[in-house]
Amino acid sequence: MVKCQNRFYPKAQDQDFLRFICEDSLKNKDYHVTQKFLLRCDNSKDIAIQMLNEWMMLGNVNEKELFVARYVLLKIACDRVNDAKEILKEYVPKLNYPIIHFTSCVIFQRNIHII
């Protein structure tokens, strides 16, 4: 665990603890906390999809794709491109919007390491 601003945060190696925090915060509908800890959690596709589906229901009908795009871009920023791909595979058929295709392009660019 790492202490930052009088709060404790699990390290990336503490996968069981990260998953526990994600499941607990999702149960309490604390989606921003769930998202924060999912970013470093391995094998989290099931929790991520559940979180995104529930969180999208709270948002405006015209903004559903933005929840997915934000999460995917955050995963890419955390260098978890494979996780981002898995989430996109789930949502591309359901959400056919330009922002979703943009995130797919970002993943493609990220994979070929353009500098």
Image (cartoon, helix red, strand yellow):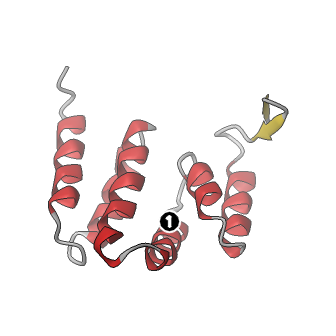
Q: Which residue: 56% across, 56% down?
A: 35
Residue closest to the far right: 6
In the visual, does 61 lie left or right of 105? right
Three-letter amino acid code at the position of disc 1: Ala
Instruction: Look at the image and tell me in which quarter the N terminus lies.
Output: top right
Residue 14 position in % (x across, y down): 72, 45
Q: Residue 81 in the image: state x and y as whole percent.
A: 35, 45
Q: Is residue 33 above or below residue 114?
A: below
**Residue 86, picture quadrant:** bottom left
**Location of residue 33 (image quadrant):** bottom right
Residue at horizontal 17 percent and vertical 71 percent from the top: 96
67 to 40, vertically: above or below:
below
- Image spot of residue 114 (x, y percent): 17, 25
Q: Position of residue 27 (x, y in %)?
A: 70, 75
Q: Count up the numbered dots.
A: 1
Tell me if mark 1 has few (under 14), some (14-19) or many (20+) residues whose alpha carbon lies within 10 angstroms of its own.
Answer: many
Which residue lies most toward the top here? Answer: 115
Quarter of the image for the C terminus: give it. Answer: top left
Which one is in front, 17 or 6?
A: 6
Circle 1: element type: helix
Q: Is residue 113 above or below residue 109?
A: above
The residue that appears at 21% across and 43% down in the rendered structure is: 106
- The residue beneath circle 1 is 48
> Is 27 displayed left or right of 60 in the figure?
right
